[in-house]
Amino acid sequence: MSVMIVTSLRDITVDLFTDECPLTCKNFLKLCKIKYYHNCIFHTIRKNFTIQTGDPTGTGSAGDSIYKFLYGSQARFFSDEIHPNLKHSQMGTVAMASRTGTSEKNLNASQFYITLRDDLDSLDGEHTVFGEITEGFDTLNRINEAYVDDKGKPYQNIRIKHTYILYDPSQLDDLIPDASPERNLKDEIDDDVRLEDDWMPKDEELGVREEKEEALYIIFSRFGTVTSAEIIRDHKTGNSHCYAFIEFEDKESCEQAYFTMDNTKIDDRRIRVDFSQSVAKLWPQLIDDLETK
């Protein structure tokens, strides 16, 4: 029993322990079949430890089991299937993960993690091990090398693009609709702005593509109070010159915005951020002076 997980980097193939963990494997297979995992990000990366995904919100605090869709909200979570012979002894072990911030038992839903090294004995007996990676260890290594913030959230969005069931003998096919809605990409600027999937640094400078100052307020206000956001435009045509000035209330917010947003991808454009001093407000007076001469 195998599932191919197509990520934004490369593919991963998972072999499932269906005999030992039938409830867990059925849940995973059917979530794959209804495209539940499509566009989920690897929201937590603990270097040389584990990577975690399976939450459609990307926060690590959500996710539903297939049994909720079949039997209602009371079946959102299902019980552990822990076996002494299934251990975290090898890199590529696949196991169920509880929601972030809780270590309670029997709260399995959709989230799962993959180990990034051998002999993680501390996890044995704590989580349901239901599979192992058989192909794609180079992909795991690339994910392990991703840059992350202090909470383990990667600056580079690494996504599950597709899941393909290579063999599924279970008998739930008549209960799960074949035509499931495609999951839309989460709007990247609503909470944390992150680099996109195939991130590669570029040397050229690119301005902000947004054509409204309001969009700049939305993007940058999470770092602190924005006192002004001004896109520099041609004084005759009104067209943007593809750069803008964002002014913060305090220096700390400005520095945080710089370190987080520089070379970030927004709306399919790479932006460059630097410290500067705007003289745009002087242009109207200068133009008036020139026109009167």
Image (cartoon, rainbow, N blue to C red):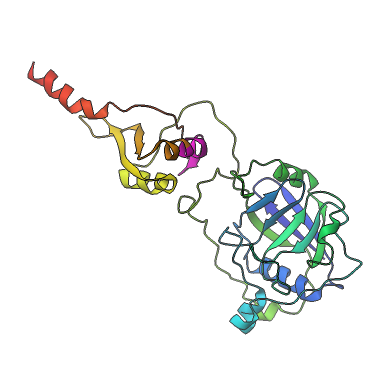
Q: Which range is magenta?
A: 256-269
Q: Nearer the viewer, residue 19 or 11?
A: 19
Asked if residue 276 can be seen in this view, the reply is yes
- The correct choice, above or below, for 124 with respect to 104 in the image is above
Q: Quadrant of the N terminus?
A: bottom right
Residue farthest to the left, as pictured = 292
Q: Quadrant of residue 61?
A: bottom right
Q: Is residue 265 on the magenta stretch?
A: yes
Q: Residue at x 64, y 81 (%)?
A: 70
Q: Which residue is at the front of the view, 159 or 63?
A: 63
Side (left or right) of 118 relative to 72: right
Q: Is residue 270 visible?
A: no
Which quadrant does the C terminus fall into? top left
Identify which residue is drawn at 67% across, 71% down. Answer: 109
The location of residue 203, given as percent across then percent down, is: 53, 26
**206 is within the stretch colored magenta:** no
Question: Which residue is situated farthest in the right direction here?
Answer: 85
Residue 148 falls left or right of residue 137: left
- Residue 23 screen position, x and y as percent: 77, 76
Residue 58: horizontal and vertical position, in percent?
Answer: 58, 58
Left or right of 221, for residue 270: right
